[in-house]
Image: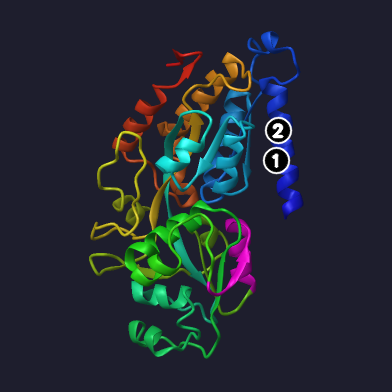
Amino acid sequence: MKKFQLLLTAVIAIALMAGCGGSGKEKAKTAEKAETITGAGATFPQPFYNKIFKNYSSEKGLLVTYGGIGSGGGIRSLKDEIVDFGASDAFLNDAKLAEMPGKVLHIPTCLGAVVAAYNLPEKPELKFTPELMEGIFMGKITNWNDAKIAAVNPGINLPDLAITVVYRSDGSGTTFIFSDYMSKVSADWKEKIGTGKALQWPVGIGAKGNPGVAGTISQTVGAIGYIGSEYAFAQDIPVASIQNLAGNFIKPSVESVSASAKGEMPADTRVSLTNTDAVDGYPISSFTWLIIYKEQNYKNRSLDQAVQTIKLIDWAISADAQKETTKVHYAPLPETAVAKAKAVLSTVTYNGKSLK
């Protein structure tokens, strides 16, 4: 997998050198027309991105390439200035923003759910409380027929089967969302494991990307892991209803994910939705973001490269793109989030001059 990631990074770099400069003819490059827009990052929204970027390429005749290498990889690729945009499910905090070579902007593109997906005989429909989530994912509950699971799921025939926890082995925004939720509902988790894109797991086996975790769960009877909802639905993997802050057991759906976003969004769009207080909200929901530099003239990128990048992102939050969200099990941006995203895009510059 490491070889694949290195190869992907090399492909991204070559693509950008072709479209953005780097040959030594710097003055000529600034006037070149964009041929390819390149991004990399989160696998959580990748099915949505694959769909809309393919549509955009067909409509506009401009190739858009996207590498699903995880949120951590997307942030690194933007930091190394080898992509036009990164993608992350974990917004950059102030400390991470300070490490970037330029001011970074966050543009939300859709909402999704991180689900507790499992592989059990007969595919029972399970309910999990925050206490069960803590017990299972911290290795305190090790068998599926544990009395604590049975107490929350009366009438379910739970097998005498060992629990195998599956987690992300790469730097992941999905991990950030999941651990952000767990840190809010479990003091023990917050103290011993915490929140982040990469964690020290007390139990389980690692897999790379949402596809890797979904595949491992599908192939391992007794497994449970956290993945983007689309990956569970695509592979017909059962997912648990999670008890939210209001005490209601909520299934992940377009409606319950949308409900989680009823609160206010700050001007910079960096907001956490986990453990929502919405009575009908799914508690492990999140926005996902494309991240770009406010000043688009870096690495001698051409003006047209910058213009085409912003046009692409502006289209991604348009009604034409947002109508595709529900087709791949995501929730569209609320109108208030679209307005905030457009306001952020309006601040982008090239050589200090507005691109809008």
Other-residue count near label 1 (Cα within 10 Å), few / some / many at <14 / 14–19 / ≥20: some
Looking at the figure, which quarter contains the N terminus?
Answer: bottom right
Q: Nearer the viewer, residue 224 or 138?
A: 138
Coordinates of residue 258 in the picture (x, y in percent): 33, 50
Determine whether 94 is above or below 232 in the image. above
User: Is residue 209 within the magenta segment?
Assistant: yes
Q: Amino acid at mark 2?
A: Ala
- The quadrant the C terminus occupies is top left
Residue behind mark 1? 9
Q: Is residue 126 visible?
A: no
| Residue 155 picture quarter | bottom left
Please say whether residue 179 is one of the residues in the magenta stretch. no
Residue 154 vs 61, above or below: the answer is below
* Type of secondary structure dominating the magenta stretch: helix
Give the image location of residue 308, x and y in percent.
55, 21
Q: Residue at position x 42%, y 78% from top?
A: 135
> Magenta part of the protein: which range?
202-219
- Spot occupied by residue 54 in the image (x, y as percentages of width and height): 60, 36
Question: What is the x, y in percent for residue 118?
Answer: 52, 72
Q: Which residue is mark 2?
A: 13
Number of numbered discs visible in the structure rendering: 2
Kindly identify the residue that appears in the image at 37 percent across and 75 percent down.
127
Between 136 and 246, the residue placed more toward the observer is 136
Q: Is residue 343 visible?
A: yes
Q: Could you tell me if the residues under marks 2 and 1 are in contact, i.e. CB atoms within 8 Å?
A: yes
Q: Secondary structure at mark 2?
A: helix
Q: Which residue does the image show at 62% across and 75% down from the upper left?
A: 220
